[in-house]
């Protein structure tokens, strides 16, 4: 149906999250209609981003340098740490402009069904960071799914001996993702955070 190079492009585009066969086909055909210079610029941007963007050595958020902009920012509150599952969550929370502390990105959630345990996540560096620095509050801002709840409870138990541990309020539906929530919902969720109760 498609010439092999076009079929390969469609196949690769389908690997992107949220891109099905029809969308991949539309994107591929759109790319082919664009001027070669524009397509080369897109391809170069993808390759450069892949080569240059890594993880911050402090918080594990995406960064083109060893330490991300948020960790380097002297105006951020060093005593408050917001723990999220993914860099997309950092981006979503930053859009609210409500939170002025620092972050720690776990790199996912505990999901035994997917073979992801605490060892595969950035939990040990988090515990070290909290135990070695004067952090007054850790806010757990992990999406409210079964795996998110498991991760929240696990991380909360580990951090409780060192500092106050709170979680964002649920202005978010169960199974919802932070990245899809609007700024107002996220802002209210941050304002309504509460301390974890293990009793």
Image (cartoon, rainbow, N blue to C red):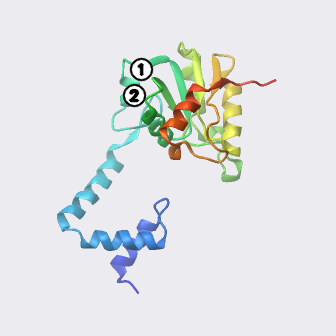
Neighbours of disc 2 within 10 Å: few (<14), some (14-19), many (20+): some
Looking at the rendered image, the quarter that the C terminus falls into is top right
Q: For residue 19, which numbered disc appears in the image? A: none
Residue most toward the top?
134
Residue 182 as seen in the image, left or right of residue 48: right
Residue 197 as seen in the image, left or right of residue 117: right
Neighbours of disc 1 within 10 Å: few (<14), some (14-19), many (20+): some
Picture coordinates of residue 43 (x, y %)?
28, 59
Looking at the rendered image, the quarter that the N terminus falls into is bottom left
Q: CA distance from mark 1 to mark 2?
A: 7 Å
Q: Could you tell me if the residues under marks 1 and 2 are in contact, i.e. CB atoms within 8 Å?
A: yes
> Who's the residue at 31% across and 70% down the image?
30
Q: For residue 76, which numbered disc appears in the image? A: 1
What is the number of callouts on the image? 2
Determine the secondary structure under disc 2: helix
What residue is disc 2 on? 70
Quarter where residue 63 is shown: top left
Asked if residue 64 is positioned above or below residue 36 in the image, the reply reads above
> Who's the residue at 39% across and 28% down the image?
70
Determine the secondary structure under disc 1: loop
Picture coordinates of residue 114 (x, y %)?
66, 52
Closest to the observer, 34 or 47: 34
Picture coordinates of residue 126 (x, y %)?
57, 27
Residue 106 as seen in the image, left or right of residue 5: right
> Who's the residue at 58% across and 32% down the image?
189
Asked if residue 65 is positioned above or below residue 158 in the image, the reply reads below
């Amino acid at each position: 149906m498609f010439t092999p190079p076009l079929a390969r492009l469609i196949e690769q585009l389908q690997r992107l999250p949220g891109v099905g066969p029809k969308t991949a086909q539309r994107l591929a055909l759109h790319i082919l209609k664009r001027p070669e210079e524009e397509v080369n610029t897109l391809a170069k941007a993808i390759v450069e981003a892949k080569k240059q963007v890594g993880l911050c050595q402090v918080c594990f958020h995406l960064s083109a340098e060893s330490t991300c902009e948020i960790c380097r920012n002297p105006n951020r509150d060093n005593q408050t740490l917001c723990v999220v599952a993914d860099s997309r969550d950092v981006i979503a929370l930053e859009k609210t402009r409500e939170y002025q502390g620092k972050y720690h990105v776990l790199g996912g959630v505990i999901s035994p069904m997917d073979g992801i345990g605490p060892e595969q996540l950035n939990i040990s560096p988090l515990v070290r960071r909290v135990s070695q620095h004067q952090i007054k509050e850790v806010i757990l801002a992990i999406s409210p799914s079964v795996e998110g709840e498991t991760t929240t409870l696990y991380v909360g138990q580990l951090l409780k001996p060192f500092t106050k541990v709170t979680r964002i309020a649920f202005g978010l539906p169960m199974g919802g993702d932070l990245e899809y929530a609007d700024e107002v919902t996220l802002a209210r969720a941050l304002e309504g955070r509460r301390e974890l109760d293990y009793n």
